[in-house]
Image (cartoon, rainbow, N blue to C red):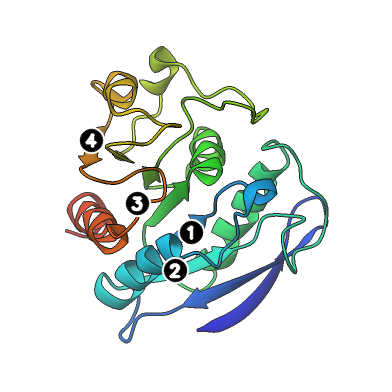
């Protein structure tokens, strides 16, 4: 694991960790964490599982990083708007270390940011999103693309949620992704994918193999 730092367009220095595969990378991946005001950071078992899957088993140079204002990253929380710049910079940083396609992964808050950035960033080859917050409850986040707007994305998209996810209910996710995404519901777990982290990560790895690395 290699500690890295990189700068955003607006001059914020972010911290992250880069894991390289044992052999030459087949591509790259960026991992976006959950809401920083609710305990989200790069250091979460869900994200560790995804990172280990993508770098250790699928051959992707994988960068997980902290959004601005989180732990050792500079700047202040940007409400899900300024964080678009963070994702943009992270994609640039990992692509300096690996040629080939780039998978963008996000969980919860990170899924919202990742999806919105992908509409503006053609370096993103595919997206995999866990627990995208279709119900924000008390979280004041920018609106997600509408189902009609989602049809303009035109890139492989995996949407995954737990059967009991209160922020991303299964039936609402099926409706949101209809015709534009692969939708997977993991039984017996919730927004935090408790005890199913490795299962969920393997689904992301299989998706990457099919849509980017075949």
Q: Are marks 4 and 2 in contact (CB under 8 Å)?
A: no
Question: What residue is shown at x 48% (from left), y 36% (from top)?
Answer: 115
Q: What is the CA distance from the residue labelled 1 to the residue labelled 4?
A: 20 Å
| 100 lies above or below 113 | below
Q: Residues within 10 Å of mark 2 (few under 14, many from 20)?
A: many
Task: Decide which of 115, 201 is in the foreground and name it.
Answer: 201
| 136 lies above or below 208 | above
Q: Residues within 10 Å of mark 1 (few under 14, many from 20)?
A: many
Label 4 sits on residue: 182
Q: What is the CA distance from the residue labelled 3 to the residue labelled 4?
A: 18 Å
Q: Earlier in the sequence, mark 3 or mark 4?
A: 4
Q: Earlier in the sequence, mark 1 or mark 4?
A: 1
Q: Which mark is residue 30?
A: 1
User: Would you say 168 lies left or right of 209 here?
Assistant: right
Q: What is the CA distance from the residue labelled 2 to the residue labelled 3?
A: 21 Å
Mark 3 or 4, closer to the camera: 3
| 166 lies above or below 126 | above
Q: Are marks 2 and 1 in contact (CB under 8 Å)?
A: yes
Q: What is the CA distance from the residue labelled 2 to the residue labelled 1?
A: 6 Å
Q: What is the CA distance from the residue labelled 4 to the residue labelled 2?
A: 22 Å
Question: What residue is shown at x 83% (from left), y 55% (from top)?
Answer: 75
Q: Earlier in the sequence, mark 2 or mark 1?
A: 1
Camera sees residue 27:
no
Label 3 sits on residue: 193
Q: Residues within 10 Å of mark 3 (few under 14, many from 20)?
A: many
Quarter-wise, where is residue 153 in the image? top left
């Amino acid at each position: 694991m290699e500690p890295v730092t990189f700068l955003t367009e607006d001059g914020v220095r972010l911290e992250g960790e880069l894991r390289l595969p044992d052999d030459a990378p087949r591509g790259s991946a960026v991992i976006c964490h959950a809401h920083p005001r609710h305990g989200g950071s790069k250091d979460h078992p869900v994200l560790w599982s995804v990172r280990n899957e993508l770098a250790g088993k699928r051959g992707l140079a994988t960068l997980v990083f902290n959004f601005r204002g989180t732990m050792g990253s500079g700047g202040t929380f940007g409400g899900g708007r300024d964080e678009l710049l963070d994702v943009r910079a992270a994609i640039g940083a990992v692509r300096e270390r690996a040629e080939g396609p780039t998978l963008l992964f996000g969980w919860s808050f990170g899924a919202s940011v990742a999806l919105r950035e992908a509409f503006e960033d053609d370096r993103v080859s595919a997206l995999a999103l866990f627990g995208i917050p279709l119900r924000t409850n008390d979280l004041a986040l920018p609106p997600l693309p509408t189902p009609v707007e989602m049809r303009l994305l035109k890139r492989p998209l995996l949407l995954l949620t737990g059967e009991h996810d209160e922020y991303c209910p299964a039936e609402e996710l099926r409706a949101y992704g209809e015709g534009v995404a692969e939708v997977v519901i993991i039984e017996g777990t919730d927004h935090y994918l408790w005890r199913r982290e490795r299962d969920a990560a393997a689904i992301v790895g299989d998706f990457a193999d099919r849509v980017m690395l075949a």
